[in-house]
């Protein structure tokens, strides 16, 4: 693929600044507040991609990715206000329009299905767009409104999607601008939400109440104010039991200030809401699956702070998009207003197992344990033979490891032959990990991927529920993220792949997130730009951006998708609606305190001899003044225990010897007394050299003292 800019002519269209006006709300009795935004853009450049071109604009990483349509870069801008704020006029001004004539078309988006039937359904050009003289997109910007939760606060969300370039396919012409200014009128208003009385609302059938009591007690004893309400105590205020529950959650937000909601029970124990999405290409229906969405119970408010029924067309079909290709679509913002998670337990034993695992995990402050720093990424070539020759599962895995800087990456990949056998996956998990990510194809009970550019499946026989049930990692429990079809489809298989991790009595996982239906992805490097690949990577970005609980990790990922990609078409709706969380949403997965600063580069010798012990020092500052513990990694596969506690800024000393010649990197990590961990320090390189004494010592170990003394006398006699 060529990376140079293709030669083209640039014409300046003589046009003064244009004003685009959109009026969403007006109140003549109130004076609006004004917000202004200015964006400056580079001239688009174009990289060759076979028979097409890929458009690039400096510092823009988001793309309009709609099946069969041109891939167009755009800049998302997210703004939040107190819930109930009204948006007035949005005026857009832009610089003169310039033109670029292309000699190839802009590349269309190519989605594929993440099931295990090799049904990639690669779609080429949408003729309604590529045969059109109309610009795509039509305007220089679009916007969406929503009501959601951010940093624990209920907010109105305004998303601006700014398009610095348009494409006129029939003329193969680009129009672009170098500057866009946006002027927004807002009318501030805040809905009343009660001062916090409870953090966590647990909803459950009556038969699980006794088993849940220890969890409620544990939460209340650990500053997570919690209440258990059984389903028989929920009043009938809606059209069915599901809507009764949703209204109850709304009341709990407004009366108690709850932020977390835990649903307990599988499909038969706790009511589920089915949603209706049709993905069609022209008149051809490609995917019209009906599936469960727990997001229904989390998306309580619309952008105006009103109850969101998920049935705006009143046909008793919920969360619709173009159902049966009729255009029947519900106007829903899809933003979660509470952080939600489900324990899909089918009996009392599963409830006890989940509760005991949660309590042990939080009591041990798992996020502060050394094993928590391990991140296992599992994948291969999700879409073989793509134009870029990229193995999507490994590409996403590397992006995850780049995001999780300071963590230890364990790669179970097709390219290193580690994913060939299910036993390798289990070994990596049983060695302890804070996070595990699967990227590939799935069914409700299995996962697999492809070798590079081959259609065969690995691991041989797949990675199945039986493999998960065999895990014995005890309390070293990861959070598992699964990017594949239907692995969390608990309404079809009660012990589905994602839930089996959590229900394992001897280990498995503490929580998981996966898809409750058939899921879709993009091939090549665009796999992370939208659909399921965005969600997989987005979960880790949410964690590194400050998510402290499992529910925040889930919720911030959904919100990020809606703000950065947008709910434009059927597959966007489906992507966020099927993102199923199994686990306690209030589960503490990161320290509530600030982590220590990055430790100083270790100080000590930079060369040495085998078998000789050397000392090294470092220190770190904790922004909260907390006591600090240190972990040394000696670069030879060995690490220390956590050393400490030490006062903030106090130097720590540790010693080590190396048994083999070579060059090693010594690095240090710090954590505070609450378990919040720093990044790894800059490494110190040490070279360990060969010596006669080390050789003689080895001979003594093997052959005994007599041979040792003979050789020693001989060698030193020669000297």
Image (tube, rainbow, N blue to C red):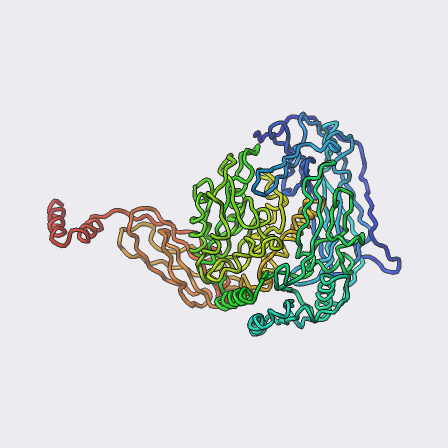
Extreme-right residue of the structure: 28
- Residue at x 52%, y 56% (from the top left corner): 501
- Residue at x 14%, y 50% (from the top left corner): 712
Horizontal relation, residue 685 to residue 556: left or right: left
On the image, the x and y values in percent for residue 26 come to: 86, 55
Horizontal relation, residue 648 to residue 511: left or right: left
- Residue at x 11%, y 47% (from the top left corner): 714
Res. 624 visible in picture: no
On the image, the x and y values in percent for residue 518 come to: 62, 46
Compared with residue 172, is residue 537 higher up or lower down, i.e. above or below?
Answer: below
Q: Nearer the viewer, residue 280 or 684?
A: 280
**Residue 655: quarter of image:** bottom left
On the image, the x and y values in percent for residue 630 come to: 42, 62
Horizontal relation, residue 370 to residue 561: left or right: left
Quarter of the rendering occupied by the C terminus: top left
On the image, the x and y values in percent for residue 496 come to: 56, 54
Res. 640 visible in picture: yes
Compared with residue 557, is residue 256 higher up or lower down, i.e. above or below?
Answer: below
Compared with residue 526, is residue 604 higher up or lower down, i.e. above or below?
Answer: below
Q: Nearer the viewer, residue 159 or 113?
A: 113
Quarter of the rendering occupied by the N terminus: top right
Total number of numbered discs in the rendering: 0
- Residue at x 40%, y 64% (from the top left corner): 643
């Amino acid at each position: 693929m060529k990376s140079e800019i293709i030669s083209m002519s640039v014409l300046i269209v003589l046009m003064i600044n244009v004003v685009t006006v959109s009026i969403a709300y007006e109140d003549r009795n109130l004076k609006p507040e004004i917000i202004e935004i200015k964006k400056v853009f580079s001239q688009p450049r174009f990289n060759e991609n076979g028979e097409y071109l890929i458009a690039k604009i400096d510092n823009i990483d988001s793309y309009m990715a709609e099946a069969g349509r041109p891939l167009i870069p755009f800049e998302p801008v997210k703004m939040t206000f107190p819930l109930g704020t009204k948006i007035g006029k949005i005026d857009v001004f832009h610089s003169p329009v310039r033109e670029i004539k292309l000699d190839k078309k802009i590349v269309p988006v190519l989605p594929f299905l993440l099931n295990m039937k090799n049904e990639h359904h690669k779609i080429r050009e949408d003729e309604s767009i590529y045969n059109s003289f109309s610009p795509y997109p039509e305007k220089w910007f679009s916007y969406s409104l929503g009501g959601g939760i951010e940093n624990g606060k209920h907010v109105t969300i305004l998303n601006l999607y700014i398009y610095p370039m348009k494409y006129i396919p029939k003329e193969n012409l680009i129009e672009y601008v170098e500057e866009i200014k946006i002027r927004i009128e807002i009318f501030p208003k805040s809905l009343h939400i009660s001062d916090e009385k409870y953090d966590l609302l647990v909803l459950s059938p009556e038969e699980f109440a006794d088993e849940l009591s220890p969890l409620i007690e544990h939460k209340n004893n650990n500053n997570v104010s919690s209440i258990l309400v059984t389903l028989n105590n929920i009043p009938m205020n809606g059209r069915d039991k599901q809507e009764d529950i949703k209204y109850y959650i709304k009341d709990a937000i407004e009366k108690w200030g709850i932020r977390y909601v835990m649903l307990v029970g599988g499909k038969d124990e706790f009511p589920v809401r089915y949603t209706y999405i049709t993905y069609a290409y022209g008149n051809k229906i490609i995917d019209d699956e009906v599936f469960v969405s727990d997001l229904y119970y989390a998306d309580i408010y619309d952008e105006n702070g009103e109850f969101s029924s998920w049935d705006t067309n009143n046909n008793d079909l919920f969360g619709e998009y173009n159902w049966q290709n009729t255009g029947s679509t519900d106007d829903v913002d899809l933003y979660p207003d509470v952080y939600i998670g489900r324990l899909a337990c089918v009996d009392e034993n599963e409830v006890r197992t989940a509760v005991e695992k949660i309590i042990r995990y939080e009591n041990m402050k798992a996020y502060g344990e050394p094993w928590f720093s391990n991140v296992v990424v599992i994948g291969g070539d999700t879409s073989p033979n793509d134009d870029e020759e990229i193995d999507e599962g490994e590409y996403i895995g590397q992006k995850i490891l780049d995001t999780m800087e300071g963590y230890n990456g364990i790669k179970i990949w097709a390219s290193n032959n580690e994913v060939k056998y299910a036993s390798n996956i289990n070994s990596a998990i049983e060695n302890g990990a804070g996070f595990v990510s699967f990227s590939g194809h799935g069914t409700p009970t299995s996962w697999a991927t492809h070798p590079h550019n081959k259609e065969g499946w690995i691991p041989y026989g797949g990675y199945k529920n039986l493999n998960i049930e065999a895990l014995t990692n005890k309390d070293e429990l990861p959070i598992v993220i699964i990017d594949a079809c239907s692995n969390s489809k608990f309404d079809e298989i009660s012990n589905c792949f994602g839930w089996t991790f959590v229900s394992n009595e001897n280990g498995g996982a503490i929580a998981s997130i996966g898809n409750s239906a058939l899921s879709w992805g993009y091939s090549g490097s665009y796999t992370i730009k939208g659909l399921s690949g965005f969600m997989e990577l987005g979960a880790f970005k949410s964690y590194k951006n400050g998510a402290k609980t499992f529910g925040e990790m889930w919720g911030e990922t959904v919100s990020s998708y809606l703000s950065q990609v947008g709910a434009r078409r059927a597959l966007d709706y489906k992507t966020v609606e099927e993102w199923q969380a199994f686990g306690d949403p209030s589960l503490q997965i990161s320290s509530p305190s600030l982590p220590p600063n990055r430790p100083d580069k270790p100080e000590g010798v930079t060369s040495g001899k085998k078998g000789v012990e050397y000392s090294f020092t470092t220190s770190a500052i904790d922004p909260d003044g907390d006591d600090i513990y240190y972990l040394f990694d000696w670069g030879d596969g060995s690490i220390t225990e956590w050393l400490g506690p030490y006062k903030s800024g106090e130097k720590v000393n540790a010693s080590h010897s190396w048994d083999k010649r070579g060059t090693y990197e010594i690095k240090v990590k710090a954590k505070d007394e609450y378990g919040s961990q720093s990044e790894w320090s800059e490494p110190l390189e040490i070279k360990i050299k060969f010596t006669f004494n080390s050789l003689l010592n080895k001979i003594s170990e093997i052959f005994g003292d007599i041979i040792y003394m003979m050789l020693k006398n001989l060698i030193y006699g020669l000297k």
